[in-house]
Image: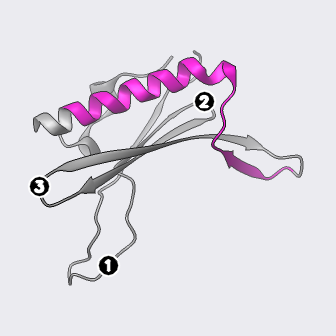
């Protein structure tokens, strides 16, 4: 694969400083080519879980960038690598080794 994976990390939060509800941000995003895997960290009383969305960016017939939840057969290897990298982040987060939103590119590798 020719493009590097871009990794973006965000601090996930459901509450502001005064306890009011604020917009929840992704725990992290991983990108490879036109694909983007977004991870959402869900904190419950006694456990933490993650949910994921996989999308593909493309230019529509009108020249506007759009996102689709469908991927092409040529995207399958990139999608598998993004899922592997996300799994690695979640495992490290659950082990308490490194919070998922603090991992760097060198911690999870780069898709080439």
Secondary structure mainly formed by the magenta segment: helix
Crowding around mark 2 (Cα neighbors within 10 Å: few <14, some 14 to 19, many 20+) is some
User: Which is nearer the eye, 106 or 66?
Assistant: 66
> SS of the residue at dot 3?
loop
x and y percentages locating residue 111 in the rendered image: 47, 20
> SS of the residue at dot 1?
loop
Residue 21 is tagged as 1
> Do residues under tags 3 and 1 come within 8 Å of each other at their CB atoms?
no
x and y percentages locating residue 37 in the rendered image: 48, 39
**Residue 97 seen anywhere in this rendered image of the structure:** no
Does the magenta segment cover residue 3?
Answer: no
Residue 33 is tagged as 2
Does the magenta segment cover residue 70?
Answer: yes
> SS of the residue at dot 2?
loop
Mark nearer the viewer, 2 or 3: 3
Mark nearer the viewer, 3 or 1: 3
Q: Residue at x 24, y 43 (%)?
A: 102
Residue corresponding to mark 3: 46
Range covered by the magenta-colored residues? 63-91
Mark nearer the viewer, 1 or 2: 1
Crowding around mark 1 (Cα neighbors within 10 Å: few <14, some 14 to 19, many 20+) is few
Q: Can you tell which quarter of the image residue 35 is in?
A: top right
**Tag 3 or tag 2, which sits nearer the N-term?**
2
């Amino acid at each position: 694969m020719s493009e590097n994976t871009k990794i973006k990390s965000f601090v996930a939060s459901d509450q502001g400083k005064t306890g009011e509800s604020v917009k929840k941000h992704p725990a992290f995003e991983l990108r490879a080519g036109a694909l983007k895997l977004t991870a959402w960290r869900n904190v419950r009383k006694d456990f933490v879980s993650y949910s994921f969305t996989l999308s593909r960016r493309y230019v529509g017939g009108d020249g506007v960038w759009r996102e689709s939840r469908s991927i092409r057969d040529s995207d399958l290897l990139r999608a598998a690598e993004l899922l592997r990298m996300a799994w690695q982040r979640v495992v490290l987060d659950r082990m308490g080794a490194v919070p998922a939103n603090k991992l760097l590119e060198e911690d999870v590798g780069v898709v080439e």
